[in-house]
Image (tube, helix red, strand yellow):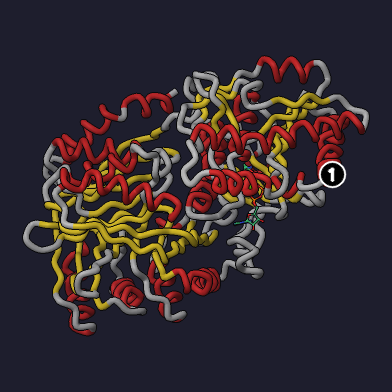
Amino acid sequence: MSLIVQKFGGTSVADVEKIRAAARKAIRAQQQGHRVVMVVSAMGKNTDVLLKLASDVSPNPPAREMDMLVSTGEQVSVALVAMAIDALGSKAVSLTGGQIGMKTDDSFSKARIQSISTERIERLLDEGNIVVAAGFQGIDDDLNITTLGRGGSDTTAVALASVLGADACEIYTDVDGVYTTDPRLLPEARRVDVISYDEMLELASLGSGVMHNRSIEFAKKFNVPIHVRSSFSDMQGTMIVTETESQTASVCGAAMTPNEARVTVLGVPDVPGKSLQIFSAIAAQKIAVDMVVQDIGLQGRADISFTVREEDLQTTLKTLKEVLPEVGAHAVTYDDQVSKVSVVGGNMAKQTNVASTMFRALADANVNIQMITTSEIKISTLVPRSQADAALRAVHHAFTLHEKPEDAKSWDQIRSERGNRADVDALISRLQADVLEALTLTGISLTKSQARVTLHGVPDKPGIAADIFETIGEAGVFVDMIVQGYDGEDGSTSISFTIHQDAIERSLEVTHQVCKKHGMRDFQSGTDISKITVSGIGLRSHTQVGTILFKQLADLGINIEMIGTSELQVNAVVATEKVEAATERLKKAFAASLESAAG
Ligand code: ADP
Ligand code: ASP
Ligand code: MG
């Protein structure tokens, strides 16, 4: 008998009528012959109400008590949903996180799932019940109640679908699928039929709130197809699966994180190991750092900038204050009025002009880009918060995301093309995973024969990045990574990019032209450099990845020249000397995480 997991978000259980409608959907599925597990969120905005109560009672509530408090929202919903099912004449049992054996680590408010025991759920299903499980919550080894982070009920649902070997995982929500960007921000956004795990993971991590990013880690690891659909209709929604919708479109979606903060550590001694001290201290707080840019400054000192979510800014600043003397840096500055606008696409790495198209769109909208970082699947820019909506709109339009790509495939087409081919294998079988949400790496690789070009004194005004990368693109040079720094000191910034070593002469010629045209200070290049790539799932949110990488390279005295991160890869650009040794060391350091995916 097939098993389906149906998850209902807050708006889908916001009132009595909606609770009944959700109950009816589950009953109908059961009557069609499925075993049904429901995962339910807190009613409406209840979690926000609870958070507000806490902040009214205490300026700094203990993390344990916060989780104790906010987990009650889900406990209310599961009981009411089970009662509604009972009133409609079917059998249901509600279970808390503890009761479904949802074991997590003890990081309150950001807990990661370690294991789930399925016996009780299976037994209740065998007895003909609909099981109604509380989303978002678990218990640690000491039986403390933990929560998985805002939006975490999606992760509960996909995790349950993974361990129960469900045939489908349906996410019922207040939109009828995944759109090319948040339809509340841009009404012209298009609903996509299909999106790949990789694309959705990256979009979710970069601000598409429709799915909790960690739920997609589960889906990809255990190959669970997810169907995101409206709880208010029976329309087919969006399938999140291995395949992309289009084979050619460079970009499948755009995302915005409105509340970002930029942090810069000024005057960091330019010796290996300093980044490690900074980032390991922040990672220990489980704070995910993004858009890391290092500018080689004057007199052997560098400025290191990065972004964090604004909600993590205070903890980040406090942590930095503690390590600053040890690091020997001059000062820390920050800007909490910035937003991150990104584009994502599974086919991006194969195409040229993607970055210049994005930068041109922003320039035409008169948006000044403060920072840029790229990876194989996304381009992120940091912009003033006041211009974030306009920036998102401009970028969405430039990639014609409102139009369906000509070669777009429907889920039915993709499914029939899969044909008899054994379904795409799961990376990990659920029986092999001893710790469900453990870091999973798929490989560590090396790309040699790379070169880097850095432009210094780039005027800090709209249109410069667009002009640079259009000119370089016209010269037929394929640019891999791009990083634009932040430089608070003289109001200019620096831009670095990598290319294949063969293209260095052409690149330098063009760089010379643009440098002159815009009156930039100078440019400098590095040949004989390599890119070390660590690939896996959920790399940005597993904060230890950066720490391990920085540590291994620092131990060998290797300086990281550029870094680019996504949820799927961390790329570090370094001098070729010693890279073989570095790769070997990294393989050893990450051995446990690499092994888990080997089976
Ligand atoms: P739930 O309570 O059901 O989990 P959420 O509010 O967490 O619902 O997620 C649904 C919301 O996500 C939508 O109402 C929409 O505004 C927002 N959203 C953000 N990005 C996207 C996107 N790319 N596609 C669809 N919805 C999105
Ligand atoms: N109720 C929690 C929240 O609002 C979890 C969820 O809805 O997914 O974040
Ligand atoms: Mg949600």
The one of 126 and 276 positioned closer to us in this rendering: 276
**Residue 559 to residue 85: above or below:** below
Quarter of the image for the C terminus: give it. top left
Q: Position of residue 251 (x, y in %)?
A: 50, 61
Task: Work out whether 516 lies above or below 190.
Answer: below
Residue 362: quadrant of the picture: bottom left
Q: In screen coordinates, is 44 left or right of 145?
A: right
**Quadrant of the image for the N terminus?**
top right
Q: Position of residue 260 (x, y in %)?
A: 43, 59
In front of the other: 40 or 433: 40
Number of numbered discs: 1
Classify residue 308 as left or right of residue 268: right
When the figure is inspected, residue 383 is found, relative to residue 328, above or below; the finding is below
Is residue 160 among the parts visible in the rendering? Answer: yes
Q: Is residue 508 left or right of residue 173?
A: left
- Which residue is rendered at x = 48% and y = 57% of the image? 344
Mark 1 close to ligand 1, CB under 8 Å: no
Q: Nearer the viewer, residue 559 or 39?
A: 39
Q: Say whether residue 157 is visible.
A: no
Inspect the image, locate mark 1, and give the three-letter code of the amino acid beneath it: Val
Q: Secondary structure at mark 1?
A: helix
Q: How many other residues sit within 10 Å of disc 1, few (<14), some (14-19) or many (≥20)? A: few
Is residue 108 found left or right of 298 in the rendered image? right
Q: Residue at x 42, y 25 (%)?
A: 596
List x then y, in percent, for residue 322: 24, 44
The location of residue 183, given as percent across then percent down, is 64, 63
- Position of residue 479 relative to residue 19, above or below, is below
Residue shown at 23% from the left, 41% from the top: 550
Residue depicted at 74% across the width and 15% down the height = 123
Residue under numbered circle 1:
16
- Taking the view exactly as shown, the residue that stands out farthest to the front is 57
